[in-house]
């Protein structure tokens, strides 16, 4: 019973983090992330009087983003400020939603030694993610010429913040599954089933790693507005295989995080490689009747990855409109969810159990 309670709490936490990441994407797409120019982690309220709003607005006007959008009036500012305020406070709320039940379950003795280490890791990860968020925002409070036509946070820092958020989601969801689902030893009692399971696990881990790398590259696309540069997929403007300006910057390595043509090229091609890995995983699940438990998960991975590609293409052709770009980001979390779910069905038993089964 305790496992179900803890697992349900962790599942709810991961669901909240999912929503938080989506709200963060909406915040970026609405260009609201730089509206709060101070980090006050203990302040929960937002301005309530005209005088308080005016103070925040005047403070905002001191920074580069307003200088790029001098037409943004007080009412427009209130809208973007409220979006960022909601994002920050939901983040604080999720941290509290995790920390307080964790303390209760710890006191009740629901965690073993390994569980305690994992819970402390997740709690610390919340703090790291919050710090990374402010580290990202600070980078947008100073204008840099390479950001072209508008002020923005550094794409690398945005990509780091988003990837950390997705990792926090993944770790929390994985631990929820650990409490909610039985140990792998319960259905891996034959050597051929165990061997097939370990092979499937290796393929799924490879697909998960590729997905995270592709998502990081996608965050660079979002942070640099590279998705608005070439919108005629599968080509790159008038170029077919690679943008003609992909290696224009010097030194050469700057192209991978400052050259928008190269940034989009890398993201697209990582997506192709990820799709190949996912297809291989899907075909392996269909060919092996011993692992019927993975069939649903692998079908979900394949279907959601295909959908992710279509959503990406749609976002490109739309010029990265808010709703299409947000669906592309949200579905990426569903891809991660499906891979972790499948990995949990073939998670690795302890070495002693593996040795005993393989000797039979």
Image: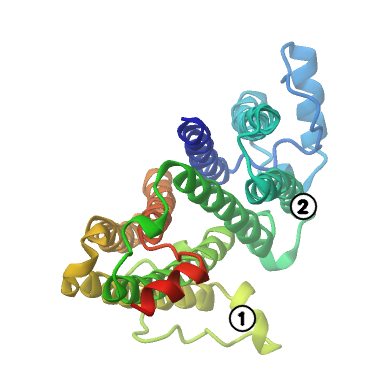
Res. 293 image quadrant: bottom left
Q: How many marks?
A: 2
Closer to us: 238 or 348: 348
Closer to us: 337 or 189: 189
Q: Position of residue 72 (x, y in %)?
A: 64, 34
- The answer to whether 201 is drawn above or below residue 173 in the figure is below
Q: Position of residue 224 (x, y in %)?
A: 58, 63
- The answer to whether 94 is drawn above or below residue 304 in the figure is above
Alpha-carbon span between mark 2 and mark 1: 23 Å
Q: Which residue is mark 1?
A: 255
- The answer to whether 39 is drawn above or below residue 346 in the figure is above
Element type where label 2 sits in the image: helix
Closer to us: 193 or 352: 352
The answer to whether residue 232 is left or right of residue 174 is left
- The answer to whether 80 is drawn above or below residue 178 in the figure is above
Label 2 vs label 1, nearer the camera: 2
Residue at the image position 70 percent from the left and 48 percent from the top: 133
Q: Is any atom of residue 89 visible in this view? A: yes
Residue at the image position 74 percent from the left and 50 percent from the top: 128
Q: Position of residue 238 (x, y in %)?
A: 36, 81
Q: Which residue is mark 2?
A: 135
Q: For label 1, count other residues whose C-alpha is less than 10 Å away and answer few (under 14), some (14-19) or many (20+).
A: some
Q: Position of residue 161 (x, y in %)?
A: 64, 54
Looking at marks 2 and 1 on the same chain, the residue that comes earlier in the sequence is marked by: 2
Q: For label 2, count other residues whose C-alpha is less than 10 Å away and answer few (under 14), some (14-19) or many (20+).
A: some
């Amino acid at each position: 019973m305790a496992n179900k309670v803890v697992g349900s709490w962790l599942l709810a936490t991961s669901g909240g983090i999912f929503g938080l990441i989506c709200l963060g994407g909406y915040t970026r797409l609405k260009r609201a992330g730089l509206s709060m120019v101070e980090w006050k982690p203990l302040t929960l309220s937002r301005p309530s009087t005209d005088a308080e709003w005016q103070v925040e607005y005047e403070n905002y006007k001191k920074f580069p983003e307003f200088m790029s959008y001098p037409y943004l009036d007080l009412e427009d500012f209130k809208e973007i400020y409220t979006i960022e305020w909601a994002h920050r406070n939901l983040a604080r709320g999720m941290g509290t939603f995790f920390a307080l039940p964790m303390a209760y379950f710890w006191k009740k003795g629901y965690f073993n030694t390994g569980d305690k280490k994992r819970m402390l890791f997740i709690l610390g990860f919340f703090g790291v993610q919050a710090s990374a968020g402010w580290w990202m925002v600070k980078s947008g409070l100073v204008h840099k010429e390479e950001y072209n036509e508008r002020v923005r946070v550094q794409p690398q820092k945005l990509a780091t913040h988003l990837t950390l958020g997705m990792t926090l989601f993944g770790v929390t969801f994985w631990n929820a599954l650990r409490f909610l689902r039985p140990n792998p030893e319960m259905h891996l009692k034959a050597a051929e089933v165990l061997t097939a399971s370990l092979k499937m696990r290796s393929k799924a881990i490879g697909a998960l790693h590729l997905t995270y790398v592709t998502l990081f590259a996608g965050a660079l696309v979002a942070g640099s507005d590279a998705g608005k540069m070439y919108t005629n997929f599968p080509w790159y403007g008038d170029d077919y295989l690679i943008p003609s300006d992909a290696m224009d910057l010097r030194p050469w390595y700057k192209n991978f995080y400052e050259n928008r043509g190269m940034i989009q090229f890398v993201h697209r091609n990582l997506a192709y490689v990820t799709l190949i890995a996912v297809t291989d995983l899907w075909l392996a699940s269909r060919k092996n009747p011993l692992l019927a438990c993975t069939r649903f998960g692998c079908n979900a991975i394949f279907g959601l990855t295909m959908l992710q590609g279509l959503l990406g293409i749609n976002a490109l052709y739309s010029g990265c409109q808010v709703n299409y770009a947000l669906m592309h980001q949200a579905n990426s979390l569903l891809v991660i969810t499906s891979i972790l779910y499948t990995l949990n069905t073939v998670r690795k038993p302890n070495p002693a159990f593996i040795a005993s089964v393989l000797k039979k």
